[in-house]
Structures are given as C-alpha cells and as structure tokens.
Amino acid sequence: MLHETNDVPPAHLETVLTGLTQVEKDWLRDQGAAPDDDAEALAALAAVAGIARRAIRQLDDGQTLDGRTPGDQAYDLRMVCRYLQDLTTGHEAQAGLDAYEAWAAWKLTAGEWASFKDLADRLRRLLLTKDATAPRAAAPKAAGKKSNADILAEELTKRLGRPAPKGREARVKAVLVLGGRAYTGANSGGGLLHVTYDLIRPRVTRMEDWSATGCAEAYALDQWVYQNGFATADAAYEALCGTRATFKDGRIAAMDARTVHGSTGRFWVKRMPCENCQQWLKALGITADRTLNFS
C-alpha cells in the first residue's frame, strides 16, 4: 500500500533530490519519453538505477521516504537495482532497446517497481515545484526563418522508420512544434501537470476510449507548458490563441511502433492523432501534420 506524501518529511525527499545528477533529474521530469536508440535506452535505465541507489543511501540512514519502515523500502529499491543490473551487465546483458522493453514488461507486475514509482512521483512533484519557482532563462528564438512545419518535417525525418521497442505493448510518440522549438511526448500513463490537464480536458468531448494521462500528444503539450513556465491554463491558452499570442501556428505529428510488412521488428510509423486529440488540438490552434505518408 502506498502512502500519502504528508507521511514523509519534505527534508528527506529534498536530500535525495539534491544528490541526483542532472541526467537523473531530467528522467524524473520526462518519465514518459520513450528512447529512440540503444544508447538512450541504457541511459534511461542507468538514471532509474541512480535514483534508486541515492534513495537507498538515505533509507540506510534511517530516514523514511514513503511512510513505511526504511528497511522495507530499501529492500524494494535494491531489488529494482538488481534487476536492472542483470539486464544491462554481465553475460546475460541485453541490447539497450531490448533491455528497456524487458524492463517495461517487468514493471507492470513487480511490486518492487510500485515502491520505486511512488518515490519517483514524489520526487518529480518536488522537482517541478522547485523548477516553477526558479529563475528562467529567456526561451531561445526560432532558428533562422524556418516555419514550425519545416521544423516538424525535419524532426520526423530523424524518427520515422527507425527501430522501435519490441513486443506487443502499444508505443506512441508525438512531436509538437511551437515557437520554433520541438517538444516530444510518449504514452507513459503517468501524471500530467495540472496546468496541462486543465488546458486540455474542457476542450474534449470523449468520442472513444481515451485518457489524457496516457496520450503522447498530451505529454508533448505538457513539455511545452513545463519548459515555458506557464502557471495557469488561462495563461497557456492566451499564449496559443489570445490577441497577443506568441505561439501561433503550432504543428504536431504522432507515430506508433508497428511491425512493417516484410520485417521481423517494429519501427516508428506515422499516424494521425485520435478523434479526441483532434478536438483539443483544433481548439488550441495546433495543426496535425499531413506532409508524410502514414505507412
């Protein structure tokens, strides 16, 4: 059973967060992003192991991080580290994307992973709170005279047709371009920022089975909201559609992992956003790209 965050002294989580590397913090911010290649997959698994090891140090000092006894949670996190070590080192090690896929399947049923996920969610909330109050550098200007459509086409050229994680689990990614910058998302099923959820949900009348928290397009928008520091849905809407909108003519494309005819593996293939996403995309002035084939 997972516990409420008020069971845990904030200073304990703060100490863990302070000890994380920038790569590990980036993983917490963007847990939904699926890796594009073996190197990215191994880096993601290493970040998970690093977060677990840092938390174990805190637990071994007797400081609770989830309301249970430190020893119980430390045991779960050690099992996570041991599993990741078996996947990535030694004579049974798997290639990066294969290891990532095996890990993705394992964590669906492993009780130890539920303990880590609870901790990661707590750390992510704390990190995003700190990010929101930290001074932000000015957003870089769009490169040259490239349009959002041009930038999206370049991003898709880098991704479409590349190997995707193996297995039967549905894998979807999305690329959103606003203000000359690309933002990516994946169907992770994790939590959206409340600003993003409040921006999307009133603009959708459900037409098919759909959840904003399992949507790659929603996570791409979530990255835009986060990286530009919007504190309210109204502020984000004004930036997209207001009289002084600074993020007009947004473009988006989605892709999923499919087995291509004549091949033995899965590859990233373009698809259109679902009917639900098409509703909020249209309401926010974001156009789904149609310049490339969908198969």
Image: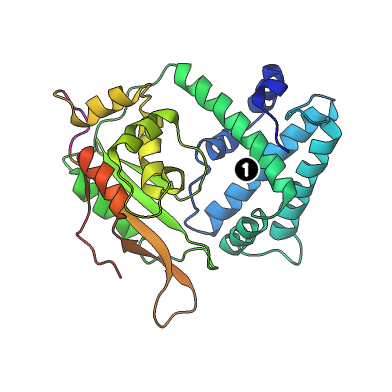
Q: Is residue 205 above or below residue 14?
A: below
Whether the magenta-drawn stretch holds residue 247 is answered as yes
Q: Position of residue 130 (x, y in %)?
A: 52, 20
| Relative side of 208 to 61, left or right | left
Q: Is residue 123 above or below residue 275?
A: above
Element class at badge 1: helix
Q: Quadrant of residue 125?
A: top right
Which residue in the structure is indicated by mark 1? 47
Quarter of the image where the N terminus is located: top right
- The amino acid type, in three-letter code, at marker 1 is Ala
Q: Is residue 5 above or below residue 103?
A: above
Q: Is residue 133 above or below residue 123?
A: above
Task: Characterize the local packing of mark 1: few (<14), some (14-19) or many (20 or more) Cα atoms within 10 angstroms.
Answer: many
| Relative side of 191 to 200, left or right | right
Q: Position of residue 71 (x, y in %)?
A: 86, 34
Quarter of the image where the C terminus is located: bottom left
Q: Position of residue 104 (x, y in %)?
A: 61, 56
Marker count (numbered)? 1
The colour scheme of the drawn protein is rainbow
Residue at x-position 13% and y-position 24%: 243
Q: Position of residue 80 (x, y in %)?
A: 74, 48
Residue at x-position 65% and y-position 44%: 48
| Relative side of 44 to 178, left or right | right
Whether the magenta-drawn stretch holds residue 222 is answered as no
Per the picture, the main secondary structure of the magenta-coloured stretch is: loop
Q: Can you name the residue that lies furthest to the left here?
A: 243
Q: Can you name the residue that lies furthest to the bottom here?
A: 262
Residue at x-position 27% and y-position 42%: 280
Q: Quadrant of residue 178?
A: top left
Q: Quadrant of residue 90?
A: bottom right
Identify the magenta region. 244-248
